[in-house]
Amino acid sequence: MKTYELKPNNRQNSFYGKATVTEYDNGTIELKSYDTIVCRIQNGIFQRLWSGYSATTMKHINAFVDYFGIAGGGKAWWDGLEVVNN
C-alpha cells in the first residue's frame, strides 16, 4: 500500500495535502478529499462513494480521473453517477 498527495491538473500549484491517493496491494485506488473517501477505482471500474458535492472536492476528483485516464469529470458527470455503498 502507498499513499501520496494528488497533484492538480490545472494552473494550481498544489492541493496542500487536502487530496490524497491510496493505492492498495490488491489494485484498488482511492481518492480522499479532506477526510472523506469520495471515489475509487476497483477492478478497473470507477466508483462514486460519496453522495455529496463541493467545488473544491470536484477539482480533486477531476485531477484523479485525469491522472488515471478515466473518462469523465465535471459536476453533471458526477451527479449522474450512482453512489456505491462501501
Image (cartoon, rainbow, N blue to C red):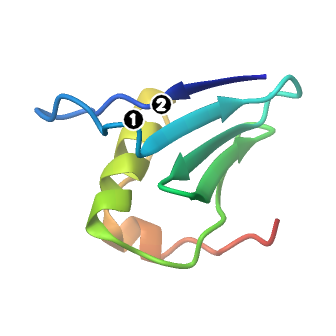
Residue 26 is marked as none
Where is mark 2, residue-wise? 69
**Residue drawn 36% across and 39% down?**
63
**Residue drawn 31% across and 37% down?**
16
Instruction: From the top left corner, tell me how far across and down residue 36 is, in percent.
Output: 59, 61
Mark 2 belongs to which amino acid?
Gly
Q: Is residue 82 above or below residue 18?
A: below
Question: For the residue labelled by badge 2, is the local secondary structure a helix, a strand or a loop?
Answer: loop
Q: Is 42 positioned to the left or the right of 75 in the image?
A: right
Instruction: From the top left corner, tell me how far across and down residue 75 is, in percent.
Output: 33, 69
The reply to whether the C-beta atoms of the residues labelled 2 and 1 are less than 8 Å apart is yes
CA gap between label 2 and label 1 equals: 5 Å
**Residue drawn 74% across and 70% down?**
84
Instruction: From the top left corner, tell me how far across and down residue 86 is, in percent.
Output: 82, 65
Where is mark 1, residue-wise? 66
**Which residue sits furthest right?**
26
For residue 19, what is the image quadrant?
top left
Q: Is residue 38 above or below residue 78?
A: above
Q: Is 5 positioned to the left or the right of 40 in the image?
A: left
